[in-house]
């Protein structure tokens, strides 16, 4: 039997290791910043396209061509990093030829990067680089081992100083890798720190799904809040060199994580003094109920808060909701910054918001 | 216009944030360690299955059921962590319902974890945990910014000691995340260190594709070797607390990375004293040519080498190739350990090999 395998193996040319090169490329970014996306699907009847920069309802179709390769050319796109995926006869799939995969809680996507004429705030520049560390720790609250991603600023490893700390949350279809993969936290922070626009800080990025993916959102929010406060904060602040007081602790998040930032931050003013929510999708009533004490004692809340910031894109399905939430907070007496911008519910906006709000921290 | 968006937004129920729960689950691990894999593809004519534990040519088919959900039940599988993917009418896709995605250079896959009755060497146990740090650095050799993953052992952050260092390479369809995602480096090393079977060490995991994915393998190997020696080693050893001598430096790798380990290690005995190759697929002649000097001066090579280890699974297409390579090395006078085992070309084997070879290091 062993000999048979050996003989069979000798008959297979070693070149078998090299897969047959694909007869096409994808994505192909053209000089005018249009992009051609392709996927080989010879037996498909329909291939549609999803891009995180598209308005709701905008579902481009691909056209079949030679060798079963479907394609569509979109754009021109602005410089940036965008997420896309295909639906082949209704089945969601990332781009098989693109190694730059966006991990999601459901149905992975792919990234395409469009370079501009000059480096943008999210581009990798020749500045000192921080790092992102993946920590595994046992959560007593959840009874499981979980990942927490942690950005440390340039020079952290060789330094003795203590740093302020930002807890930064991803959205519903995300993972603990989100702010690294899609938020480009390392480049955004490295560039801000190099330009002295932000102070060097540690950024902690936990995994928000405390309950199974389909669990009710606010039930998950509350379980996550308990996990963050009881397990993540003590574990992280025992390991990293942090200042460890509320003046040097912030909590930010996007979408589902924006709801987490607001509800955790305003309920734990003993821990946090700076709060930002990007494009929250949590129910307004649900949020108000959880932060009732902070709203009922607005003057005291204001005296303890250095930053309460709510941003949302005008083309986001949740824009009116964010506007109404900020108005309620203001009407109840909270000193809140509402920051509406053009944009949809995507990482382009959230990178911009991080770039705008990280400089507000820890002064 | 702004009002129109606001009105439209108000009409969308907030529950839209919650996707419709999928009408099925996947993967479903049964008590008898059989696993049912499912994917919803109502318009597909054929769905096939690829699993990294299957023998070449074994391509199970899924059967269509209610609501267009295709399924197949396989196994029982041994305890372990396996990689699988679907082909829907020929289009490769990971499991859309499974958030645990295997990043690959081409066509991402999905992980399924089968628990045993007792914790295995790759399972997360309640022992002190190391961490994995993602570093970004500018490569002068390649003219681009690249990722390097680095495992640091438990206690590294608070310690002052210097550590030995293992450079550990992934295979062709992999990324710098491979040994973390699929090799479970943190759990394997944490467990070995907790049991005092391996000494605490730093493990450096670079990204092997120095050239585009379809470039000839040995051409890529040589470009990568140059990058590793000139850029990665100096960058890493300036940042981390390492002992920094050849007695405390090893180079291991799998498949394409096994070729890299052999060719880099045997050409750079000034840097490395311990070398292991798992399931190399590189051409025997190509490897021999690159390590000709080490073969020509076998006695001197032996005097400088503490470990030269070649392992391969008997059911691997490359088994005979590995056996022949080890024989040539021995015939030429090198002191080489050839370690054949049962197994195919997969991560189950490579985790086992890491578990067997890491304890051999740095005594």
Image (cartoon, coloured by chain):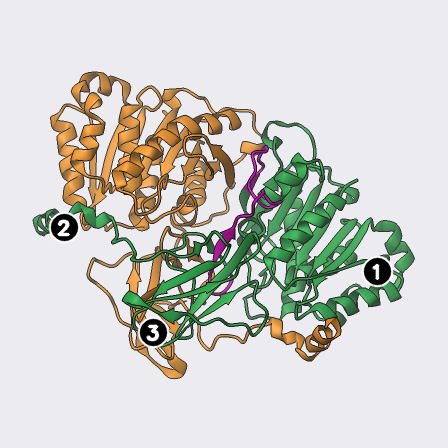
Chain colours: A green, B orange
Q: Position of residue A89 (x, y in %)?
A: 39, 75
Q: Residue at x 18, y 51 (%)?
A: B315
Q: Which mark is residue B12?
A: none
3 or 2: tag closer to the N-terminus: 2
Q: Which mark is residue A44?
A: 3
Q: Nearer the viewer, residue A316 or A147?
A: A316
Q: Secondary structure at mark 1?
A: helix
User: Which image quadrant: the C terminus of chain B?
Assistant: top left
Question: Residue B76: in sight, yes or no?
Answer: no
Q: Which residue is mark 1?
A: A294
Q: Residue at x 36, y 57 (%)?
A: B107
User: Which image quadrant: the N terminus of chain B?
Assistant: bottom right
Label 3 vs label 1, nearer the camera = 3
Q: Residue at x 49, y 65 (%)?
A: A106
Q: Which residue is mark 2?
A: A12
Q: Secondary structure at mark 3?
A: loop
Which chain contains the residue that carries disc 1? A
Say whether mark 1 and mark 2 are on the same chain: yes
Q: Which residues are magenta?
A: A104-132
Q: CA distance from mark 2 to mark 1?
A: 70 Å
Residue A255 drawn in magenta: no
- Tell me the chief SS of the magenta region: loop
């Amino acid at each position: 039997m062993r000999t048979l395998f050996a003989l069979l193996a000798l008959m297979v040319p070693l070149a078998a290791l090299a897969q047959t090169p694909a007869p096409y490329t994808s994505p192909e970014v053209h000089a005018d910043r249009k992009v051609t996306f392709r996927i080989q699907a010879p037996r498909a009847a329909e291939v549609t396209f999803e891009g995180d920069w598209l308005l709701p309802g905008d579902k481009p179709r691909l056209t079949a061509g030679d060798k079963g390769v479907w394609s569509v050319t979109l754009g021109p796109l602005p410089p940036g990093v965008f997420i896309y995926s295909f639906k082949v006869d209704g089945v969601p799939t990332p781009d098989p030829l693109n190694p730059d995969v966006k991990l999601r809680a459901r149905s992975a996507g792919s990234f395409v990067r469009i370079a501009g004429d000059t480096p943008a705030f999210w581009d990798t520049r020749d500045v000192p680089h921080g790092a992102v560390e993946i920590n595994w720790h046992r959560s007593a609250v959840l009874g499981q081992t979980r990942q927490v991603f942690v950005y440390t600023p340039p020079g952290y490893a060789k330094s003795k100083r203590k740093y302020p700390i930002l807890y930064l949350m991803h959205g519903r279809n995300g993972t603990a890798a989100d702010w690294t993969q899609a938020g480009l936290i390392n480049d955004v922070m490295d560039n801000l720190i190099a330009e002295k626009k932000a102070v060097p800080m540690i950024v902690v990025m936990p995994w928000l799904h405390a309950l199974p993916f389909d669990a009710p959102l606010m039930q998950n929010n509350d379980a996550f809040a308990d996990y963050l406060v009881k397990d993540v904060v003590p574990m992280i602040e025992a390991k990293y060199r942090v200042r460890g007081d509320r003046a040097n602790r912030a909590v930010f998040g996007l979408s589902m994580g924006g709801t987490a930032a607001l509800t955790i931050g305003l309920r734990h003013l003993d821990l946090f003094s700076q709060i930002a929510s990007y494009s929250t999708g949590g129910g307004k009533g649900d949020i108000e109920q959880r932060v009732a004490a902070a709203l009922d004692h607005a003057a005291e809340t204001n005296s303890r808060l250095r930053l309460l910031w709510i941003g949302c894109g005008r083309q986001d399905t949740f824009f009116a909701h964010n506007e109404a939430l900020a108005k309620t907070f203001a009407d109840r007496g909270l000193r809140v910054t509402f920051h509406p911008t053009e944009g949809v519910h995507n990482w382009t906006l959230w990178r911009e918001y991080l770039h705008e709000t990280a400089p507000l921290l820890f002064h």
